[in-house]
Image (spheres, rainbow, N blue to C red):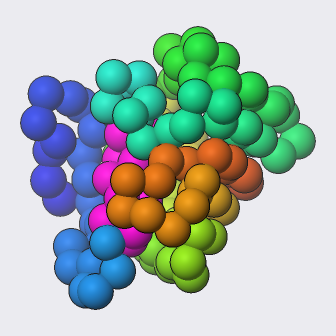
Amino acid sequence: MTQTPGGNLAIVDIPERCGNAPRKEVVRDMTVALYRRDPGELLPYLSDRIRWSVIGETTLEGTDEVAHWLSNEPAPRQLKINTVITHGWECGVDGSVVFPDGTAYAFSHMVFFTGASKTARVKEVRTYRVPTTVV
């Protein structure tokens, strides 16, 4: 388990090597930024016209709404990323988080980029999260 610099988020496990798929590294790092709850770290990955759906809860339109939502979400104390999968402009990441009060959930984020270039930003995210006791 490693402690993230400048934060209280302990990273239990994340894929270190992303092989020949640079998008894996982007999605992995974006996920860490998300759970650090730091808009300054997360927003540079996102298109200004981002559409972020937390399935069954809310849909956010634009970086201002994402930043506001992020500042109101509880900060987890622990993050584990199981898998990062990429296929062109479409990517997925799954794992789990644990909060200071002991509650936990498993998550999956489907991530869609604006294009194929290395500088393309994320235009859409669909987040699924399920309460769990297994982390």
Residue 120 image point, x, y percent: 47, 53
Q: Where is residue 131 in the image (x, y as percent from the top left)?
A: 69, 50
Question: Where are the magenta residues, as a range?
Answer: 23-34
Residue 113 to residue 39: above or below = below
Number of marks: 0
> Residue 27 appears in which quarter of the rendering?
bottom left
Judging depth in this view, the residue of 15 and 1 nearest the camera is: 15
Left or right? Give the position of 81 relative to 16: right
Vertical relation: 99 (above or below) 19: above
Residue 29 painted magenta:
yes
Q: Does the magenta stretch include residue 49?
A: no
- Tell me, yes or no, if residue 69 can be seen here: no
- The secondary structure that dominates the magenta segment is helix
Please tell me which residue lies in front, 60 or 135.
Answer: 60
Quadrant including the N terminus: bottom left
Residue at (37% x, 62% y) in the render: 118
Indicate whether 31 appears above or below 52.
below
Q: Could you tell me if residue 2 is visible in this image?
A: yes
Q: Position of residue 58 (x, y in %)?
A: 82, 30
Image location (x, y in percent) of residue 16: 21, 73
Q: Residue at x 51, y 38 (%)?
A: 46
Q: Please identify the quarter of the rendering in which residue 61 is found.
A: top right
Q: Of 88 and 128, which appears nearest the observer?
A: 88
Residue under the point 17% across and 41% down: 4
Q: Residue at the spot x=88%, y=42% of the render?
A: 56
- Looking at the image, the residue that sits furthest to the right is 56
